[in-house]
Image (cartoon, rainbow, N blue to C red):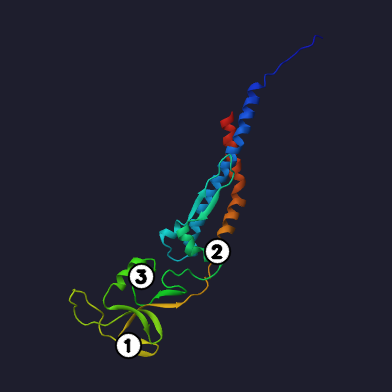
């Protein structure tokens, strides 16, 4: 029987495989960035369950600080610096961050708060601008107080009525708006790092598989 020689041209396949090999780092970077943004969204969504009435500012606290590239397969997810200042204790433990007076918490009593139940700097500044409001210690309580003023002032504003309030068991015509209390350790936990690790563990395989499939389609 005469010999039959069959040749198979694999050059195109080799080129495709070579191109696919070149796509691997892009696939890895794509998978890492996909996971990074999944972590960012997962962390921000968790804040609404951890805190009562969190501000939108807090719900945007997590960021993808650095995206991965084919030459640097590292993606970084972090808290934005402004939010990290007051959220960090909830991750690592420690006392509440206190912007008003070092070492103490400012707590509303009869003073106004925003719709999130918090005291904004702008609101506090407006309260303190009133001529009938002062900071001080009364009957052992340090806080922000309002004096009783009857009738209208020269500037057209009005003060509180002259009703009596009980402060530490004694009557006073002053109204306690806010008080400073000793700082305490936070009792809630963000579990920021733990949640991020869980997202990688449960979704990492799919993210990488999806990225590789896309790379294969691109190569062929």
Mark 3: secondary structure? loop
Per the rendering, the mark at residue 128 is: none
Q: Earlier in the sequence, mark 1 or mark 2?
A: 2
Q: Residue at x 45, y 72 (%)?
A: 102
Q: Quadrant location of residue 145?
A: bottom left
- What is the crowding at mark 1: few (fewer than 14 residues within 10 Å), some, or many (at least 20)? some
Could you tell me if the residues under marks 1 and 3 are in contact, i.e. CB atoms within 8 Å?
no
Position of the N terminus by quadrant? top right
Identify the residue under disc 1: 172
Identify the residue under disc 2: 91
- What is the crowding at mark 3: few (fewer than 14 residues within 10 Å), some, or many (at least 20)? some
Q: Earlier in the sequence, mark 1 or mark 3?
A: 3
25 or 128: nearer the viewer: 128
Q: Earlier in the sequence, mark 2 or mark 3?
A: 2
Q: Residue farthest to the top? A: 2
- What is the crowding at mark 2: few (fewer than 14 residues within 10 Å), some, or many (at least 20)? some
Q: CA distance from mark 1 to mark 2?
A: 42 Å
Judge from the rendering whether residue 94 lies leftward or rightward of residue 53; answer left or right: right
């Amino acid at each position: 029987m005469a010999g039959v020689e069959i040749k198979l041209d694999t050059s195109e396949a080799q080129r495709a495989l070579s191109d696919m090999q070149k796509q691997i780092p892009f696939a890895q970077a794509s998978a890492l960035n996909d996971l990074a943004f999944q972590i960012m969204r997962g962390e921000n969504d968790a804040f609404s369950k951890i805190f009562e009435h969190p501000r939108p500012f807090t719900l945007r606290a997590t960021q993808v600080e650095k995206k991965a590239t084919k030459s640097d397969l590292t993606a970084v997810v972090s808290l934005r610096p402004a939010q990290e200042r007051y959220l960090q204790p909830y991750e690592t433990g420690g006392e509440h961050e206190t912007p008003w007076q070092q070492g103490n918490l400012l707590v509303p009593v009869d003073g106004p708060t925003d719709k999130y139940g918090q005291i904004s700097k702008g609101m506090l500044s407006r309260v303190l601008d009133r001529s009938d409001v002062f900071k001080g210690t009364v009957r052992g309580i340090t806080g922000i107080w309002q004096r009783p003023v009857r009738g209208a002032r020269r500037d057209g504003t009005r003060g509180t009525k002259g009703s009596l309030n009980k402060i530490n068991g004694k009557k006073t015509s002053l109204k306690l708006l806010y008080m400073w209390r000793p700082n305490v350790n936070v009792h809630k936990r963000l579990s920021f790092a733990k949640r991020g690790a869980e997202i990688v563990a449960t979704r990492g395989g799919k993210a990488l598989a999806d990225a590789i499939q896309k790379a294969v389609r691109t190569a062929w």
